[in-house]
Image: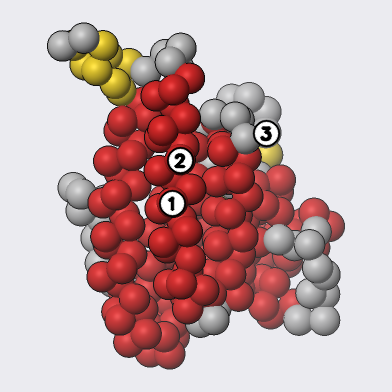
Amino acid sequence: MASREDDPDRTHGEVLWALAVGGRLSVAELVVRTAFFADEVSRALDALERSGGVQRGQTPDRVERFRLTSQGQGVAEASLAADRREVGVALEELLPEFDAANVALKDLLHRWQMRMVGTTLAVNDHSDAGYDGRILGELGRLFTQAKPWLDRLSALRPRYALYRERLSRAVDRAGRGERDFLSGLSVDSVHSVWWQLHSDLLGVLGRERGDRDV
């Protein structure tokens, strides 16, 4: 995790964009999603709050979270428009490979959550280590196949390189038996990071999430 204090505009922009993709987020969640240090995130949030771009509040579990105001949304939309002009064509060229991986991952996640027991489709209770192992093996192969286009995507924006790194860590931890790192919502799982990446791509390209999307 590297400091980027010498470029506060970039820090503010990446924190704003993480909130645009993620909704209400805590400082800890923003640290994961931006790779900034916690004190950098806090300073950026303080500055953005003073300028009217973000608003803070507490959830029922007393965690302080931040969200974009309408003004912050406007800034994020302007950032989207700039990205669309600068890298939109390149993203369009990468989209077919992304869509194919997206369909494959959606099927894999469904089979991870549900499995056939005899002739009945049941919730996967993870009692069959062989079944889970085969799914995790597929996951590893899927991301090996996806690596070339993830590398090309990463060259377009620093945040795409961070998505790639987070996905790699999640795939590795899931493969080592930490099941939540495949589809869990409370950790930086494959499902969570992929959903955020997809939201990012859809936002830049000005598209809506479809029924076939993860």
Residue 108: horizontal and vertical position, in percent?
33, 39
Seen in the picture, residue 197 relative to 120 is either above or below; the reply is: below
Seen in the picture, residue 169 relative to 64 is either above or below; the reply is: below
Q: How far apart in space, not on screen, are marks 3 and 2 (Cα)?
A: 36 Å
Find out whether the residues at labels 1 and 2 contact each other: C-beta distance under 8 Å: yes
Identity of the residue drawn at 27% across and 41% down: 107
Q: How far apart in space, not on screen, are marks 1 and 2 (Cα)?
A: 6 Å
Nearer to us: label 3 or label 2? 2
- Name the residue beneath numbered marker 2: 137
Identity of the residue drawn at 35% across and 37% down: 109
> Label 2 sits on what residue type?
Gly
Residue 111: horizontal and vertical position, in percent?
31, 30
Q: Give residue 49's quadrant in the image.
A: bottom right
Find out whether the residues at labels 3 and 2 contact each other: C-beta distance under 8 Å: no
Find out whether the residues at labels 1 and 3 contact each other: C-beta distance under 8 Å: no
Camera sees residue 129:
yes
Q: How far apart in space, not on screen, are marks 1 and 3 (Cα)?
A: 37 Å
Q: Nearer the viewer, residue 202 or 48?
A: 202
State which quarter of the image contains the N terminus: bottom right
Give the mark nearest the N terminus, 1 or 3: 3
SS at mark 3 in the image: loop
- Name the residue beneath numbered marker 1: 141
> Label 3 sits on what residue type?
Val
Residue 39: horizontal and vertical position, in percent?
84, 57
Instruction: Using residue 105 as the reference point, say whether residue 164 is left or right of it.
Output: right
> Label 1 sits on what residue type?
Arg
- Name the residue beneath numbered marker 3: 63
Q: Give residue 91's quadrant in the image.
A: bottom left
Residue 70: horizontal and vertical position, in percent?
45, 62
